Image (cartoon, rainbow, N blue to C red):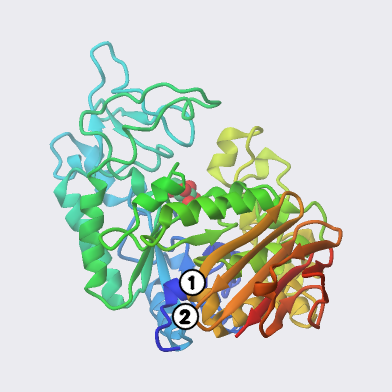
């Protein structure tokens, strides 16, 4: 299709590289492993992969603590493996999105090592250093998202540095123009290599208030939640940087950037999108929706409303930080609900993001003992929050030992259900979730209406039904999702029903549904997509 724009019209697939495929049997996934599986991804029908960080890192926060922005960690195969992956992905028309973690570095990064070494070091003001207040108190009341104060006293120079996350992740000083210039140069390095886009980790936290004003109090459970974060995130200076960043991106063809909107809602996310800002920013509402048409309907309406024509929506129900949708929305191993949600994601107006294993309905691995937790957030908050290991378990490729992920014991356990819930078995089962996803992605790609069509809500009935229309000049699609276990009738206007409708996909039928008294009867748990034109 001539005007197919990969990041707008396509589907983006997030890979957590440690857990996708281990090519050298050391128990950790790597880039040659991903290259090996590109045919699988092409067959699935994705247009881009987003790689969670693969730069050298001491892995305190598993890659979200970068020690060198210009290299690829040897455990992932090094730069040669990356170059090969990029070529092979592009050969298959799969774009590559890198994760940029720029709010902070690892405390092992040479910049920080220099910075902490003395007060007059050239890199001192690359990070946020402050003296303690007169009575020995911390510089202000800012907290770390990952628990306790955000200020860490460095014995060597008797000053505090700020960290929004763990103390092993010191925040860069974005008010230093040298930092900004260095970051832009580094981004150029990856663009020159041919990288197609970036996901910006917690981008709206880069700039902090210039006067280090305290955050005001609000009600909340944790100390972090008991503050209105008006001085440590979302500062106006961010827009100047985004302008520079965007003009750099736009000096290359078809590049893309999506930001992880930290602590923000749909409105915050929308504010950061635009021609002089980001192409996309994540709204996290979908991840907290209940399995209820009303809940999803309201989120979609809100998102459509704030974006209007200005920004392009995106939708995701999974990533490396939350309990998998399969574990959130189902207690059993039944995939009916996942087919409903898959249909919703693939037919809405906007870019869908899939997270590895979502297409086979991977469940979280159970986390039962603190001693086995690897995620530092889980160790810190145990037992109130058990961390994110659950959604990061090895991809389930086959019934072979360790699910065909590796021949060695993997870094995190494989889910017990791997012997039957895996890519190989689902590929040979026409009723499987994987086959259903493949069909959805194919239909989405073949019909422009799902890419460019406007979104028109028809109705929602709490606990039962969600229905909407997508429409272009030549095509109309009707999407009807029955969230309940019982039959539900969808009443349509005769004007809408007239015309030449055909069945595109359903998880419950092979032929066109019967229409009686302008009512289409849906089976329990049915996802139905009809097309006119
Ligand atoms: C983002 C990442 C998360 C990481 C945090 C700190 O929220 O998604 O995995 O721990 O930033 O970098």
Q: In what quadrant of the picture does the C terminus appear?
A: bottom right
Image mark for residue 94:
2
**The residue tagged with tag 2: helix, strand or loop?**
loop
Q: Earlier in the sequence, mark 2 or mark 1?
A: 1
Percent across and percent down for residue 172 are 28, 44
Decide: marks 2, 1 in contact (CB < 8 A)?
A: yes
Q: Where's residue 105, x and y in %?
A: 34, 49
Q: Position of residue 317 (x, y in %)?
A: 60, 57
Q: Which mark is residue 13?
A: none
Q: Secondary structure at mark 1?
A: strand
Of 100 and 1, the residue lying toward us: 1
Image quadrant in which you'd find residue 447: bottom right
Residue in the image at 69% along x and 68% along y: 493
Circle 1 residues within 10 Å: few <14, some 14–19, many ≥20: many
Say if 74 sits above or below 43 in the image: above
Residue sitting at x 64%, y 40%: 386
Disc 1 target residue: 49
**CA–CA distance in space, label 2 to label 1:** 7 Å
Name the side, left or right, on which 387 lies relative to 62. Answer: right
Q: How many marks?
A: 2
Q: Is mark 2 within 8 Å of ligand 1?
A: no
Q: Residue furthest top?
A: 135
- Is residue 184 something that shows in the picture? yes
Q: Considering depth in this image, is 48 or 496 the residue closer to the camera? A: 496
């Amino acid at each position: 299709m001539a005007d197919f724009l990969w990041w707008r019209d396509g589907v983006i697939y997030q890979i957590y590289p440690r857990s996708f495929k281990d090519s050298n049997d050391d128990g950790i996934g790597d880039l040659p492993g991903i290259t090996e599986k590109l045919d699988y991804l092409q067959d699935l029908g994705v247009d881009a992969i987003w790689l969670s960080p693969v730069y050298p890192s001491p892995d305190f926060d598993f890659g979200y603590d970068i020690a060198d922005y210009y290299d690829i960690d040897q455990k992932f195969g090094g730069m040669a493996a990356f170059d090969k992956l990029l070529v092979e992905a592009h050969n298959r028309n799969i774009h590559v999105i890198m994760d940029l973690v720029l709010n902070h570095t690892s405390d092992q990064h040479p910049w920080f090592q220099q910075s902490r070494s003395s007060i007059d070091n050239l890199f001192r003001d690359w990070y946020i250093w402050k003296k303690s207040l007169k009575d020995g108190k911390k510089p202000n009341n800012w907290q770390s998202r990952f628990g306790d104060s955000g200020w860490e006293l460095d014995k060597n120079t008797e000053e505090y540095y700020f960290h929004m996350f763990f103390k092993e992740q010191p925040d860069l000083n974005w008010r230093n123009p040298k930092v900004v210039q260095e970051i832009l140069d580094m981004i150029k390095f990856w663009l020159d290599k041919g990288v197609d886009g970036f996901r910006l980790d917690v981008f709206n936290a880069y700039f902090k208030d210039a006067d280090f004003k305290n955050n005001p109090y609000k009600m909340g459970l944790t100390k972090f939640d008991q503050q209105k974060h008006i001085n440590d995130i979302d500062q106006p200076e961010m827009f100047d940087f985004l302008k520079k960043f965007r003009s750099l991106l736009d000096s290359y063809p078809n590049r893309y950037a999506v930001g992880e909107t930290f602590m923000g809602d749909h409105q915050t996310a929308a504010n950061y999108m635009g021609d002089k800002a980001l192409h996309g920013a994540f709204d996290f509402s979908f991840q907290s929706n209940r399995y209820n048409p009303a809940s999803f309907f309201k989120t979609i309406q809100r998102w459509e409303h704030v974006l209007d024509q200005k920004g392009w929506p995106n939708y995701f129900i999974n990533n490396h930080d939350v309990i998998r949708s399969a574990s959130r929305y189902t207690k059993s191993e039944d995939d009916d609900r996942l087919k409903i949600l898959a249909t919703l994601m693939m037919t809405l107006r906007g870019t869908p993001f899939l997270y590895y294993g979502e297409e086979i309905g991977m469940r979280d691995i159970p986390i039962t003992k603190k001693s086995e937790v690897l995620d530092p957030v889980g160790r810190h908050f145990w037992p109130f929050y058990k961390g994110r290991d659950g959604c990061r378990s090895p991809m389930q490729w086959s019934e072979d030992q360790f699910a065909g992920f590796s021949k060695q014991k993997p870094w995190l356990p494989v889910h017990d259900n791997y012997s039957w819930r895996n890519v190989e078995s689902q590929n040979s089962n026409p009723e499987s979730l994987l086959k259903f996803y493949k069909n959805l992605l194919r239909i989405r790609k073949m019909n422009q209406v799902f890419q460019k069509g406007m979104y028109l809500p028809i109705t929602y009935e709490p606990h039962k039904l969600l229905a909407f229309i997508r429409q272009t000049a030549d095509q109309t699609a009707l999407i009807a999702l029955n969230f309940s276990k019982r039959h539900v009738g969808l009443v349509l206007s005769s004007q809408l029903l007239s015309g030449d409708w055909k069945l595109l996909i359903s998880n419950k039928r092979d032929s066109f549904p019967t229409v009686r008294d302008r009512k289409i009867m849906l089976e329990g748990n049915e996802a139905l997509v009809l097309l006119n034109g």
